[in-house]
Structure formats: structure tokens, C-alpha cells
Image: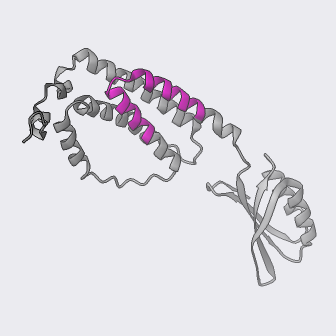
Amino acid sequence: MAAGQLTFADILRSDQLTFGATSTVGDILLSLIITFITAMFIYYIYKKTYSGVLYSKNFNITIILIALIVSMIMMGIHNNLALSLGMVGALSIIRFRTAIKDPKDVAFVFWAISIGIVNGVAYYRLSVIGSLFIGAVMLILPKRLEMLPPYMLMIKHQDSNEREIKRAIIKYCKKHRIRHRSSDENIDEIILEVRMKEKFQATLIKELKAIKGIKSVLIFSHEGELTE
């Protein structure tokens, strides 16, 4: 072997790869405390920006635990090549079976993992400033890009004047298009996708039901909200 060539065994014996053994109790506690504080900030942002039907407190607590666990792992392996290789092998056999329905939840999990990694290697300034910036984006961006949610409007009628139905829909909806039309035993059914003007669901239903021949009117959103 050529003189001066570094072997894998030399790397494993290097004194420079033993940070985990030289960390003080103060270093460990500082990293975990800052990780906990930034994870609680993520907890707040997730709860504040959640827009689904069923908020899961357990998922939000899991985000905090993920950040703390990742931070602890990073403190142990970030300067220990042998341990880091072993940890990669151990983590590769883990399979997560829990389905995440909202793609935004994946971003929060990745955010928690990121602050765990950054705090684990003592880049506290990056963790705090980055979390504050991401939190501000999460709070401001949805409000700036907010659009009227689409609703499905189902109307069952018999011998009604469809011009009156269309006139009411145009009055309270910015956009509409027919998705489905059917007729069964003299009962006509129309399903439309509409983007309604704010807070006009009840008024639209009331006006449609006042039209002669209307049997039922049903409005539901893609998130499962129902009005009739």
C-alpha cells in the first residue's frame, strides 16, 4: 500500500470521529431544549394552519417527538462514521405503514426531521431563523393564495323551469359547470360543480327550493361538509 494512503480502518480509529463521547451534559441538554422549543413552534403552526375536517393532536405531538429523537440520534452519530453507517443500516429496515392523507402533513414531518438534524449538530441559529421564516410563510401564503373552494350542487326537480334554476346559480356562484344529468321516473337530477360567493350557501338553497317543482337541493364540499 502506498505511503500516506488512508485506509478505512484508519478512519474508524480516528480520534476526530468521537464527538458523541466528548459531548457534555450541558451540550446535550441545550440541543434538546432548543429542539423542543422549535418543535413546539411547529406544533403551533400546524394547529394554526390546519384546514382539514378532523384535527389530530396525536399527529402534532408526534412531530415534537420526531424532532427530539432525530436530534438525539444526530448528537450521537454526526462525527462518528462507524456509528452513522450502522444507524443507516438499522433505519433502512424500518417501514412506516401509517398513511398521511394531506400532502402538507409530509412537509411538517420533514420540517421536524430537519430541525432535529440541524440542532443535533449545534446549528441553532439556522434552526431558529429557518423555523421562523417557514412559519411566517405557512401563515401568510395560504391567505394570499386563498381561492373559493369548489362545491358540488345536486338538484332534483320535476317539471321545473331550468332557466330559473340557472338564474339563481349565476346570481350566487362565480363559476359553474354541469357534471352530471339524469332523469328517472319524471324526476330530473342535475349535479354541478360550483364556486360560490362567500357565505351564500344557505341563500342559494333557499332560493332554489322556492322554485316550483324543486324536490331537493344538496350542497357538499370535497372535504365532506354538507348543507341541504
Q: Nearer the viewer, residue 85 or 215?
A: 85
Q: Is residue 180 visible?
A: yes
Q: Nearer the viewer, residue 160 or 95?
A: 95
| Tally of numbered discs | 0
Seen in the picture, residue 179 relative to 90 is either above or below; the reply is below
Q: Nearer the viewer, residue 92 or 101?
A: 92
Q: Nearer the viewer, residue 167 or 111?
A: 111
Q: Position of residue 135 (x, y in %)?
A: 55, 31
Q: Is residue 43 magenta?
A: no
Q: Position of residue 212 (x, y in %)?
A: 91, 69
Identify the magenta region: 110-137
Seen in the picture, residue 78 relative to 187 is either above or below; the reply is above
Q: Quadrant of residue 38?
A: top left
Q: Is residue 211 visible?
A: no
Query: Residue 206 vs residue 81: left or right?
Result: right
Q: Quadrant of residue 217?
A: bottom right
